[in-house]
Image: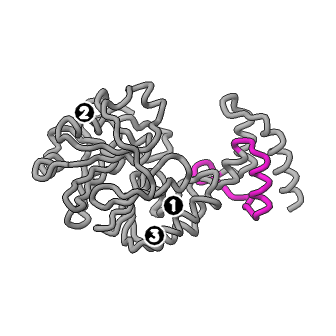
Amino acid sequence: MTKRSAPNVQVIDLEPGLWLWRLEHPHWSEGEDWPEVVTSVCVDAGTERWVIDPLLPPDDTTEVWRRFAERPPTAVVILIGDHLRETWSDQTVWSVDALVDRYGCRTFGPNAFDQDMIKKWGRPKVEGQQIVPGRELPGGLLPFRDVRGWAETPLYLPQHRTLVFGDGMTERAGSLRVWMSPTHEERALPDLRAMLALPFERVIVSHGEPVHSREAFERALDLPPWPATSLHIAAWRGDLDQVRRLVHLGADLTALSDNSGLTPLEWAVNASENEGSRAPGHDEVIAYLTSVMKQD
């Protein structure tokens, strides 16, 4: 991607005390599995003003900075390690550090950051408090364990009846979807269904169209995960035991991935032919899936 001289910044008000802004990620490039435009959230909760997964816009983006000047943020939270984002204007400064320097915010984050990002850009100067699922945050925000098991902490904003996800859910082609994981059936779906006990009315996601209804959330639980099934992932990893287990549970061997239009067997074949992804179990997975498909 050729970096723009200035991003397009969109500010969206959802209700008093809850708004978001959207702009292009400075390091997005063609071929990423997420859209170029990402979302950051600002929420007032009691005496707190939280900023969630910030990607700070340039200083001349007056609407965002005017709102911060009128009521400065008191806390910033990163929901998932790879949402540790730089400021748009200066890729040597993390947005969380910029907010702390400017407003003295407290910081909260996951138990792990993306190590490739840390190696490339350095650790944030500010070491935040670790979010603990189930332990209420200042202002009453409630974090949950990552539905996919990948170090994300979705948040419930009770004052605004809103769920906020980093990557656990995403939007593609107009539909809210659960992002794929190896334990979609065992963990993601039960955890997400448990959230239906909350009186939430909307869902905010970082990637794709940001705001969705409770009804869209319910529909997402009946759709295949995006962009591929648990069987695709197990086949890609060469995990024969997991592949067998999923097949015995009735996994669809003919399911096509959204991004490549390939079956789990084709994912296994592609992984086996790639030096970076080939695993000892791929040959057995390919043989097993081939035999099962012939029986069908």
Q: Tell me: residue 32, above or below residue 172.
A: above
Instruction: Describe the element under mark 2 as helix, strand or loop.
Output: loop
Q: Amino acid at mark 1?
A: Arg
Q: CA distance from mark 3 to mark 1?
A: 9 Å
Residue ID for mark 1: 177
> Which of the 4 image quarters holds residue 88?
top left
Q: Residue at x 59, y 54 (%)?
A: 258
Q: Is residue 209 visible?
A: no
Residue 216 - label: 3
Q: Amino acid at mark 2?
A: Ser
> Which of the 4 image quarters holds residue 254?
bottom right
- The magenta-colored residue range is 236-261
Q: Is residue 81 magenta?
A: no
**Which residue is at the front of the view, 292 or 250?**
250
Q: Tell me: residue 172, above or below residue 151.
A: below
> How are the residues colored?
one colour
Instruction: Describe the element under mark 3 as helix, strand or loop.
Output: helix
**Which residue is at the front of the view, 86 or 129?**
129
The image shows residue 91 at horizontal and vertical percentages of 31, 29
Earlier in the chain: of badge 3 and badge 2, it is 2
Q: Residue at x 43, y 51 (%)?
A: 132
Residue ID for mark 2: 89
Q: Is residue 42 visible?
A: yes
The image shows residue 196 at horizontal and vertical percentages of 47, 72
Give the left or right position of residue 129, taking residue 171 as reference: left
Q: Tell me: residue 280, above or below residue 141.
A: above
Give the left or right position of residue 188, taking residue 85 as reference: right
The image shows residue 213 at horizontal and vertical percentages of 39, 70
